Image (tube, rainbow, N blue to C red):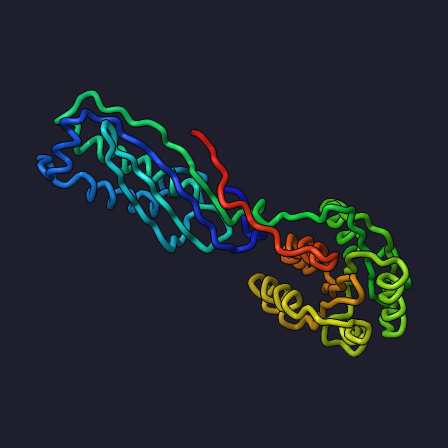
Amino acid sequence: MRDISAKHSTLRTASATASLRVQPATLDLVRRGEVPKGDPLEVARVAAVQAAKDTSRIIPYCHPLPLDHISVEFSLGDDRIEVEVSVKVIHKTGVEMEALTAASVAALTLYDMLKMLDDSMEIGNVRLVKKTGGKSDFAHRPAAPVKAAVLVVSDSAAADPGRDESGRLIAGRLEAEGFEVAAFRVVPDKPEQVMEQLKEFADRLQVDLVLTTGGTGLGPRDTTPEATEAVLEREATGIAEALRAYGSQRTPFAVLSRGRAGIRGRTLVVNLPGSSKAVAESLDALFPACLHAVSMLRGGGHPECPVSRKNQL
């Protein structure tokens, strides 16, 4: 199974369909409720719900999911029964396989219920109709190039830049996300120097994003949050809260970070912790939301998420 521990839990939905081609006479028996084995539609509905819940036991690499909703609908045409299954979950991975499995099992169950009446039946058109809530739905990148700056706040790194790991990790992740790292600075745990650098990044360089690392804890020289707050014009409290919430799911020590986030001009400033492990986790929590934040700071609105992606199977 793939490691999904770094992913965000979002509302995920998927719809899938399948069809069973049958003889018109067989459909008449279904409509009249005269199938010897009982009502095939209701049995297939229960089978589909159970199949969706048991998908991880059928498809080896699927993750077990705590499904929140499953709906199964049937429509009877002239020569076929159409099945549509919709599934919802709030989790880290999608539910397209659950929807596809449920639709397939519903069609198989109908086949089993009707096979004594019709030996010409054929299952087909199993396909994913739509899915929402995955990473690509939220990966809205600004149209123009984005610039970032990294500020390492550490007495030890200022004395020996070779000791810095977190700053280099941030720079590498920013470049991987498509940012140009326009500046990289290392300063000691001195509020006035932190403030001076933040002003330079936002006012002179006018970068889109500034990420700091270090000085966010409870130590006597951990003053990065105060220095940051002094230069911010508007707070973005939700970002700082999200980083702590994400981190606290992985270590109880994450709640000790006092990092701030906010805006100066059109620059988003976010404090990250000092340890490289905490930085990596914070970056996972920060993306892709900070890309959308850059667009908003440039005057853009909320983009619409795609409502469907079709995939014929």
Of residues 113 and 220, the one nearer the viewer is 113
Left or right of 207? Residue 115 is: left
Dividing the picture into quadrants, the one containing residue 112 is top left
Establish if 280 lies above or below 15.
Answer: below
Q: Please name the residue shown 75% across and 62% down the image.
A: 268
Look at 76% across and 76% down and name the residue there.
219
* Residue at the outermost bottom position: 220
Q: Determine the residue positioned at 86% across, 69% down.
A: 194
Q: Is residue 251 above or below residue 129?
A: below
Instruction: Decide which of 105, 216 is in the foreground and name it.
Output: 105
Count of labels shown? 0
Rendered position, 123 above or below 242: above
Q: Residue at x 76, y 54 (%)?
A: 170
Q: Position of residue 153 (x, y in %)?
A: 83, 65
Give the x, y percent position of residue 122. Answer: 27, 24
- Of residues 255 and 118, the one nearer the viewer is 118
Classify residue 200 as left or right of residue 19.
right
Q: Quadrant of the C terminus?
A: top left
* Image location (x, y in percent) of residue 234: 73, 71
Whole-percent x, y for residue 140 in the image? 64, 48
